Image: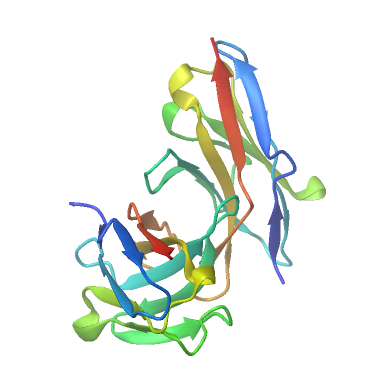
Amino acid sequence: DTGVSQNPRHKITKRGQNVTFRCDPISEHNRLYWYRQTLGQGPEFLTYFQNEAQLEKSRLLSDRFSAERPKGSFSTLEIQRTEQGDSAMYLCASTSGGTLNIQYFGAGTRLSVL
Amino acid sequence: AQSVTQPDIHITVSEGASLELRCNYSYGATPYLFWYVQSPGQGLQLLLKYFSGDTLVQGIKGFEAEFKRSQSSFNLRKPSVHWSDAAEYFCAVGEGYGNKLVFGAGTILRVKS
């Protein structure tokens, strides 16, 4: 396994711009999760996919956020009209699912909104 | 809603000393419990997990944790801390069908020589 890969590692953008992050899970992992981590806090759940189906979204995921997982492989997280409050680390995790749901995390994408 | 509390924001221990990081959870059913470690600029690495069975679980890097249902606790321990253990530690509980993780706020461990 090559591990969970996230790109870019860092993104600096101006308020109001759109940004997109990519996550490549461990191959054959059918569940993929997105979390957001702000300074001094633990990660907070945003959404998850079982294959290509988005099964749950947190109320933290406002209308400006959208996530996709076409073909059940990689996933993208897009934030439209970024705000300074969106500045955070965005973490992706994947798992093979089942009862023993061990999630493997990527290194994250750090977003800074100026 | 399920929640995880890590009462200690920062802990400083001397190298070679023992360590205990506290974690309390709120969950109605039998919890799936995890400890993760995060070094600066890195993702989260799983240290250990508890699903069922023996309440004392062993993990990587010499860490262990004990599940105590009566106290709703899952404290992490290590008998002798190394300088490389300095990092942030997160306790988490798996919630719901999708087993999304609910994390505590983390404990930053500093190791002094």
Above or below: residue B46 compared with residue B56 = below
> B54 or B22, which is in the foreground?
B22
User: Residue visible at 70% across and 46% down?
Assistant: B6
Quarter of the N terminus of chain B within the rendering: bottom right
**Residue drawn where x is 63% and y is 51% of the image:** B105
Q: Position of residue A102 (x, y in %)?
A: 42, 56
Name the foreground residue: A38 vs B18.
Answer: A38
Pick whichever, B73 or A61, lies toward us: A61
Q: Where, by quadrant of the figure, is residue B18 drawn?
A: top right
**What is the image's colouring?**
rainbow
- For residue A77, above or below residue B47: below
Residue A13: image quadrant is: bottom left
The vertical placement of B97 against A6, above or below, is: below
Residue sitting at x 28%, y 76%: A76
Q: Position of residue B22 (x, y in %)?
A: 70, 38
Q: Nearer the viewer, residue A61 or B59?
A: A61
Residue located at (55% from left, 20% from top): B111
Q: Where residue A32 sits: x, y (%)?
A: 35, 71
Question: Which residue appears farthest toward the right when viewing the image?
Answer: B70
Residue B19 visible at all: no
B101 relative position to B44: left or right: right
Residue A56 in sight here: yes
